Amino acid sequence: MYEFAVTPAVTNIRRRGVTITDVTPSSLGGELELEAGDRVIKVNGRVVRDYLDFRFQTSGETELTLEVRKKSGEDWELMIERDEGEDFGLSFEQIVPRQCANECIFCFCKGNPEDARPSLFIRDEDVRLSFLYGNYTTLTSITEDEMQRIIEQRLSPQYVSVHATDLDVRAYLLGIEKERADISDKIARMLSAGIEIHAQVVLCPKINDGEILKKTIFDLAEFYPQVSSVAIVPLGLTRYNSDQRLTAVTPDFCRQTIKEITEIQSQLRDQLGTTFAFLGDEIYLKAGRKVPGRKHYGDYPQIEDGIGMVRSFNNQFSSLVKKLEQQPSHNRSEFSGTIMTGTLFAPVLREKIDELNDRFGTKLRVVGVENDYFGGDVSVAGLLTGSDFVKAQKEIQGDFVIIPRTTLKSDEEIMLDGMTLIELKELLGLPVLPFDLRSFSNWLSSSFPIHMSSELLAQSCALKA
Ligand code: SF4
């Protein structure tokens, strides 16, 4: 199931235009009698491929012609005049991602159990999603059409998985021939068109570490500020990765990497005024080291890639403590429950929660949950599953359980092993609250006991631990 042919990636065959999924009442779209299920085919004579095209082609235009295929099958041509900046009030179908045509030796898809959620097997490689959500692409199979689109529509920044600037090493890691692995012309073209690039290295011991990593960082630094940062994240191995070419990331390896990269960072800060090459939080935590201070991360250019999350969490937690101190003193002893998180983050969180318990009388307990579903060295919170939480049930104390919001799908209360939040609640026999720090903070500040705070539970977002 994992053996994809190494052929150029293709765009999924789909109908022309983009489908409207929702129309805000009393909006321009509503006045035009557009409805969910209608498809916008062209704007001012230009074909619309997705909602990004719609956004780009309508932006700044006050006089527009829309060609619409109604859900009834009728074709409408709408001549529109609108005020500057007036919104159509339309929501559109999601972008269907293009699939990659690589065979990376560390591909996360190879580390999934067979019964994992189907979406975990999607090998997306899509410059549109890179622009919209910071998804990384390798640029190995980008088409001319896509390149032109990035430049014309200013889809900047782009997030590029470089892994190594040494071409032999890059081709080896991506499992493709050198000609396709060479993206130097593509990068040069984007940079000369003013597109900003954030780069990523998935650090694989004995393959792209040491001198290869050093070369990669300095090669990319030559293009600063157009290449504005490099994220160095460690290889993650689950029990299902059996590729003999891969070596696990150990605490010793992390300590050695920190030593080498700290020197380079200091040199780059002198030269460029920025840290430029950032190590993933996981590397510091695995090494048993403290994460760097606030200044190290600047404006957190790679936080979505796990760079600076712990620092940001610590700072936000300090703000929460200050906020609670300013509130009238409530008895918070009714906050008696268990917070479950990954084993990697548990010590950091425990230190903070202990502080909270001491100061405010809460009775919260942090449990680091082993990831048995993926196994291997997977220890981050976001990859915990329902079955892992259930296995840690005997550690639970108090009246409720808090789990990281990131363990649930963004648009559905379901975990990576397919267990729903409702099923988890039933199995644990307790309320289960999927929180991020913001919703946790709101909930705690509310000073209501758990059974009264349904409104806050509804707002819960993602415990980014
Ligand atoms: S790691 Fe990414 S680019 Fe590489 S094979 Fe997997 S999905 Fe494709």
Image (spheres, helix red, strand yellow):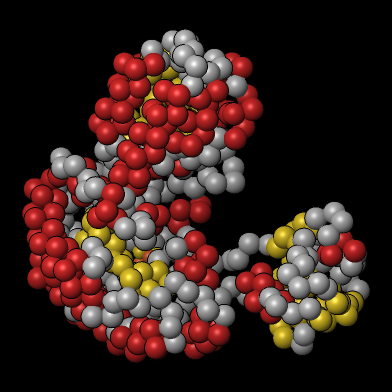
Image-quadrant location for residue 179: bottom left
Please name the residue shown 59% across and 66% down the image: 96
Residue 37 position within the rendered picture, expressed as x and y whole percent measured from the top left: 80, 62
Residue 344 position within the rendered picture, expressed as x and y whole percent measured from the top left: 26, 38
Please name the residue shown 64% across and 27% down the image: 455
292 w.r.t. 401: above or below: below
User: Front-most of 22 and 447?
Assistant: 447
User: Front-most of 249 and 269?
Assistant: 269
Residue 325 position within the rendered picture, expressed as x and y whole percent measured from the top left: 41, 23
User: Front-most of 264 and 23?
Assistant: 264
Image-quadrant location for residue 224: bottom left
24 w.r.t. 127: above or below: above
Q: Is residue 75 visible?
A: no
Which image quarter holds the C terminus?
Answer: top left
Image-quadrant location for residue 385: top left
253 w.r.t. 76: above or below: above
Which image quarter holds the N terminus?
Answer: bottom left
Please name the residue shown 44% across and 36% down the image: 437
Residue 321 position within the rendered picture, expressed as x and y whole percent measured from the top left: 39, 28
Q: Is residue 414 left or right of residue 140?
A: right
Q: Is residue 149 left or right of residue 221?
A: right
Quarter of the render that holds ligand 1? bottom left
Q: How many marks?
A: 0
Please name the residue shown 36% across and 69% down the image: 198
Q: Is residue 124 left or right of residue 173?
A: right
Q: Is residue 47 visible?
A: yes
